């Protein structure tokens, strides 16, 4: 089987069998296209690649000035691809399981303080239907900690108004419940009261765009960017910053790590542990700034 055919079958497998998102599929396709080009250039058989040739590929990526983080992602894609090749019995073992990822320095996620969140939300008008929708989207992302793609995919039937919960379909079609409070409830009700004026095609999705159809991830990102630019908060913020803020504020106020993991929809607890580093760093800075020991020589 030619590598092009194997890649296409693998992409179909992750889409239809594993239910990976279209974004993940596109990312895998780009990674494998880069790999395929290298193999053709070096005249290497993808089914019979050896350790030395793998190392040459890593040197090739390094020469292209890819960061360690990007190289780690490319290796992850190749592990998944070769796992598939083992599963369909095109090869007997996955060589990429024996290849270590380069070290990636841990970068603490950017987050907003509670005061900054309140300042931004209080600064958003509710003068017209579009203002109400945009304010609700901002509050929804912060109150629930959901991803932008998950936010865009919420259906009216996913909401339990009595228990203030929303059923979320996360990565890999993993379902979880998230919760919202009184501030979000107020804006949800206000948004629902004007939603019928916005829709045109009877869509089942909660959030709609200016054409009255299901809102896109890009539209939500644009809305958040517009809100931030109008606010007094000047440091760099993305929609994912609201997810980071959600997790950090929960831990700062006493939530346990396992609960935060479940609310975020993380498969691995290690992914959630990055937020404990944020809290610890904040406490360390507060100690160094305010403890009188620093004044005594």
Image: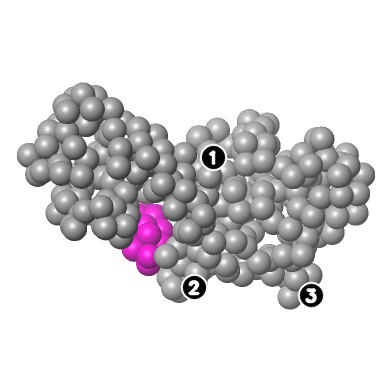
Q: Is residue 228 in view?
A: no
Mark 1 residue crowding within 10 angstroms, few (<14) / some (14–19) / many (20+) = some
In 3D space, how far apart are the residues under numbered discs 1 and 2 (Cα atoms)? 24 Å
State the extent of the magenta-drawn residues as a range: 268-285
User: Is the stretch drawn in magenta largely helix, strand or loop?
Assistant: helix
Frontmost residue, 21 versus 189: 21
In 3D space, how far apart are the residues under numbered discs 2 and 3 (Cα atoms)? 22 Å
Dots 1 and 3: beta carbons under 8 Å? no
Quadrant for the N terminus, please.
Answer: top left
Q: In terms of secondary structure, where does tag 2 sit?
A: helix
Q: In terms of secondary structure, where does tag 3 sit?
A: loop
Q: Is residue 47 above or below residue 86?
A: above
Mark 1 / mark 2, whichever is N-terminal: 1
Mark 3 residue crowding within 10 angstroms, few (<14) / some (14–19) / many (20+) = few
Q: Which residue is mark 3?
A: 162
Dots 2 and 3: beta carbons under 8 Å? no
> Which of the labelled discs sits on residue 238, or is there none?
1
Q: Position of residue 142 (x, y in %)?
A: 62, 54
Mark 2 residue crowding within 10 angstroms, few (<14) / some (14–19) / many (20+) = few
Q: Residue at x 18, y 37 (%)?
A: 45
Q: Position of residue 222 (x, y in %)?
A: 64, 34
Q: Is residue 45 above or below residue 149?
A: above
Q: Residue at x 25, y 52 (%)?
A: 90
Left-right relation of 176 to 74: right
Q: Position of residue 196 (x, y in %)?
A: 91, 49
Q: Residue at x 37, y 40 (%)?
A: 5
Q: Which residue is mark 2?
A: 259
Q: In terms of secondary structure, where does tag 1 sit?
A: loop
Q: Residue at x 30, y 38 (%)?
A: 2
Frontmost residue, 71 versus 85: 85
Mark 1 / mark 3, whichever is N-terminal: 3
């Amino acid at each position: 089987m030619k590598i092009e055919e194997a890649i296409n079958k693998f992409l179909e497998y992750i889409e239809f069998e594993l239910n990976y998102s279209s974004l993940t599929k596109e990312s895998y396709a780009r990674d494998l296209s880069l790999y395929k080009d290298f193999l053709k250039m070096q005249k290497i058989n993808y089914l019979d690649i050896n350790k030395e040739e793998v190392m040459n590929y890593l040197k090739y990526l390094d020469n292209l000035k890819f960061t360690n983080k990007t190289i780690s992602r490319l290796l992850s894609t190749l592990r998944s691809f070769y796992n598939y090749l083992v599963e369909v019995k095109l090869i007997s073992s996955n060589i990429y399981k024996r290849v270590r990822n380069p070290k990636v320095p841990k970068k603490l996620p950017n987050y907003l303080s509670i005061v900054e969140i309140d300042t931004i939300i209080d600064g958003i008008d509710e003068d017209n239907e579009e203002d109400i929708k945009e304010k609700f989207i901002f509050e929804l992302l912060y109150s629930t900690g959901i991803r932008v793609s998950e936010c865009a995919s919420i259906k009216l039937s996913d909401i339990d108004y009595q228990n203030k919960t929303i059923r979320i379909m996360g990565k890999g079609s993993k379902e979880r419940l998230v919760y919202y409070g009184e501030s979000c409830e107020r804006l949800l009700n206000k948004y629902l009261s004007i939603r019928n004026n916005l829709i045109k095609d009877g869509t089942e999705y909660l959030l709609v765009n200016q054409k009255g159809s299901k809102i896109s991830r890009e539209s939500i990102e644009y809305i958040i960017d517009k809100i931030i630019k109008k606010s007094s908060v000047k440091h760099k913020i993305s929609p994912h910053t609201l997810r980071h803020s959600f997790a950090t504020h929960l831990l700062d106020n006493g939530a346990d790590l396992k609960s935060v993991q479940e609310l975020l929809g993380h498969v691995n607890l290690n992914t959630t542990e990055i937020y404990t580093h944020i809290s610890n760093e904040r406490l360390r800075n507060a100690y160094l700034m305010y403890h009188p020991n620093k004044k005594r020589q």
